[in-house]
Each structure stands twice: as structure tokens, then as C-alpha cells.
Image (tube, rainbow, N blue to C red):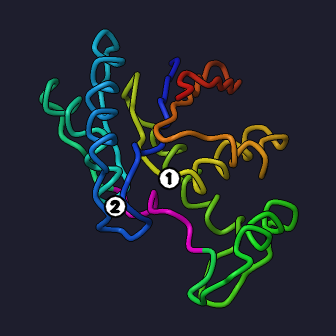
Amino acid sequence: MNKTIYIIRHCKAEGQAPEAPLTQEGFLQANELAEYFSDVKVDRIISSPFLRAIKTIKPFADNRDIEVELEPRLAERVLSSAKLPDWMEKLEATFYDMDLKYEGGESSDEARKRIVEVVEEIIAEDFGTSIVVAHGGIISLLLNYYNESFGFDQWKALSNPDIYQLSFSGGAVKFKRMWID
């Protein structure tokens, strides 16, 4: 069976905390996303439990009367529990050493395994088209899993929101960017 999964990075938010709400612009973007998907048949929606991810897909889910399933494995990756003034350089290093791990954080490999598990479960189920809403870091690791050339520079180029379409057919996986803000 052919499967399509739309991977959505959340709309603009007021911060990085799990409870950070969308900005006013983010709410407008969420409505734009609902319109963008208005002609797409969607069977299932799975979201990170972070508020900004849930609110990103809420207008679409409400319009279609589709339950948003919360999935803790889609939460954003924790780079470190310590304050890292050079966090950008530290993050970049984790794209080159997938096992590199900082205090209280998880490695790229650990985080990637979480989101890949979710996607593999979706592929194994009887849904044709699904939407997954998550965060830039974890999405980058998923896309890197399917194409190793997707790395730090591509992560930096992601927008809020952003959409990638993953197509699975006969064991082959293709992905393409659908949204550029």
C-alpha cells in the first residue's frame, strides 16, 4: 500500500518551552495550513504534545473533525539540560557525530530513533495519509534518516511552519519540501 505522511514543523511560537503558545502570526499561519490542506484527504493526525505543535494543526483538525493524537516521542530533542552559550556550535557538532551527547540531553541518534519509530508504526498501519506535527530538530533528524545529506544547514533553512511530504511505495521512500515561508 502506498503511504503519504506530511511532516509539519509547527508555526511561529513565543518560545521553546513545551507550553509556549503560538504568536499572533503563528495563529494566522495555522489557519493558512488548514486552507493549504483543505483538498487533501487525511486519515490521521499525530502531534507532539507541545502546545505550539497542537495549536498548529488544531484549525485543520477542527475543520475535518479529526482527533489529534498526542505522541510524546515527537517532542523536540533536548540538546542539554545545561545552559550552553555556544549551543549553535554544539548542535552543529551533533549532526556530524550522531552519538555526541551533552549533559542531560540526548544524542542525535537517540532522538532520531524516537521519530523513526513513530513513522515506521504509521507505515505499518492501515492509514493512507497521515499528518505528523513536530519540531525542527527532530524533523531534521527524521529527514536525515532518509537522506544523509539533510544536515545542519538544511535544519537552519527550515521555516515556521514548514511541510515535507514523505511518500512510501514498494519499499522506496521519497520526500520533498512542500512549503517555503
**Residue 165's quadrant in the figure?**
top right
Nearer to us in this view, 161 or 126: 161
Q: Nearer the viewer, residue 55 or 40?
A: 55
Sequence-first tag of 1 and 2: 2
Q: Which label sits on residue 161?
A: none
> Given contact means CB atoms under 8 Å apart, are the residues at marks 1 and 2 in contact?
yes
Name the residue carrying label 2.
50
Residue sitting at x 36%, y 59%: 14
Q: Tag 2: Cα neighbours inside 10 Å, few (<14), some, or many (≥20)?
A: many
Which secondary structure type mostly characterizes the magenta part of the structure? Answer: loop
Q: Quadrant of residue 102?
A: bottom right
The residue beneath circle 1 is 135
Residue 33 image offset from top left, x and y in percent? 34, 27
Range drawn in magenta = 71-78
User: Crowding near pointer 1: few (<14 within 10 Å), some, many (20+)?
Assistant: many
Percent x, y for residue 51? 28, 58
Real-space Cα distance between discs 1 and 2? 9 Å
Kindly identify the residue that appears in the image at 55 percent across and 61 percent down: 114
Name the residue furthest front: 24
Image location (x, y in percent) of residue 1:
51, 18
